Amino acid sequence: MKNTNELSDYLSIRNALFSEVGIGISANTILLLFHTFTFLLQHRLKPTNLIIGLLALTHIGMLTIMGYIATNVYVSQDLWDDIKCKSIIYLHRCLRGFSICATCLLSVLQAITLSPRSSCLAKFKHKSPHQILCSLLFLWVFYMSLSAQFSFSSTAISNVTSRGLVFIAESCKFLQMSYFLRHLFSILGAFRDVFLIQLMALSSGYMVVLLCKHKRNVEHLHSLSSKASHVERATCTILLLMSFFILMYCLDCIFSSSRTVWNNDHVCHSIQTMLSNAYATTSPFLLLSSEKQIINFLKSFLGKRAQI
């Protein structure tokens, strides 16, 4: 009976992981293609569209790595050498860092877009895509400079009983660092994450205040109602995106901090893996929901299918 339950849990987790990967890659691909075709047709690249496109591409990379890991764990179960172990871990960390930085910058950009002309943020409204990209790269370098420990704290281990924290496979683990280094990197990582999340929270709070003011003054903006509703819809979508990101981040932190309690339990580790990639899977649906062109196309397509 116990073996049957374990097999059922194993199959359920495997199917959930592969479903998350498949759905996430498909949705991010649609989002990326939509913004690519929009740019090719309009010959105009908005800063927010640039960030969203890069975010979708980054999430495709993250989910592809997750699919490769899931295939290794649940299908092939190959042994990894040290170079492969370090490369996979660091590449995933690079993409995850880029995703966090892009999400943070997207929130700031939307706050700038929504800000009135009299605001001190108005002077940043007409920044070129090149300047926006430089800002994103600066944030990413800042993030990765405080994540350097992952490049040397992981290794391939043939002995599965060795002490370490399993990251993706039994043959690839984090080695225990010294007490000083472990706490130093924890403090630096906490400072990094708190800084980015506070930036998201401030920009999101600012957008909420501006939306409330817009609601009160909506009668005075009747002539601009079409444009205002589009900006408002996009802002609400990004606020929802920020809220979901922070929720998933907090849950991921809770599960990560409880790894020693699990004693590397396979089920709990798999749940953490799905939580850490839930934002990459869900974010394209939230972003696509604000695109009226896609919504109208889906309604038209579903309407034709219903008639058939």
Image (cartoon, rainbow, N blue to C red):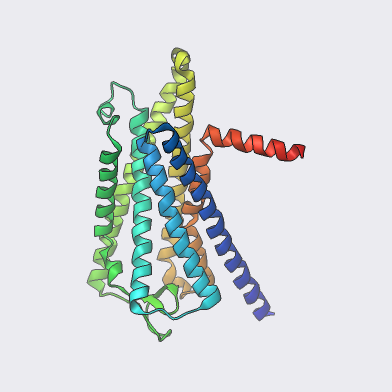
Residue drawn 32% across the image and 53% down it: 193
Q: Is residue 106 above or below residue 173?
A: above
The image shows residue 232 at horizontal and vertical percentages of: 46, 28
Please state if 274 lies on the left or on the right of 3 as rendered. Answer: left
- Residue 280, percent from left and from top: 47, 53
The residue positioned 46% from the left and 33% from the top of the image is 234
Quadrant of image for the C terminus: top right
Q: In this view, does 256 lie above or below 102?
A: below
* Residue 241 drawn above or below residue 73: above
Question: Does any portion of residue 207 appear in the rendered image?
Answer: yes
Residue extending farthest right: 308
Q: Quadrant of the N terminus?
A: bottom right
Q: How many marks?
A: 0
Q: Is residue 10 above or below residue 55?
A: below
Image-quadrant location for residue 205: top left
| Towards the viewer: 250 or 237 | 237
Location of residue 15 in the rendering, given as x and y in whole percent from the top left corner: 60, 65
Please tell me which residue lies in front, 256 or 69: 69
Q: Quadrant of residue 221?
A: top left
Task: Please indicate whether residue 261 sits to the left or right of residue 192 in the image.
Answer: right
* Residue occupying the point 44% across, 49% down: 56
Give residue 27's position: percent from left, percent from top: 53, 49
Q: Name the residue rendered at 38%, 57% in the picture.
A: 96
Can residue 203 be seen here?
no
Q: Between residues 101 and 37, which one lies in front from this camera angle? A: 37
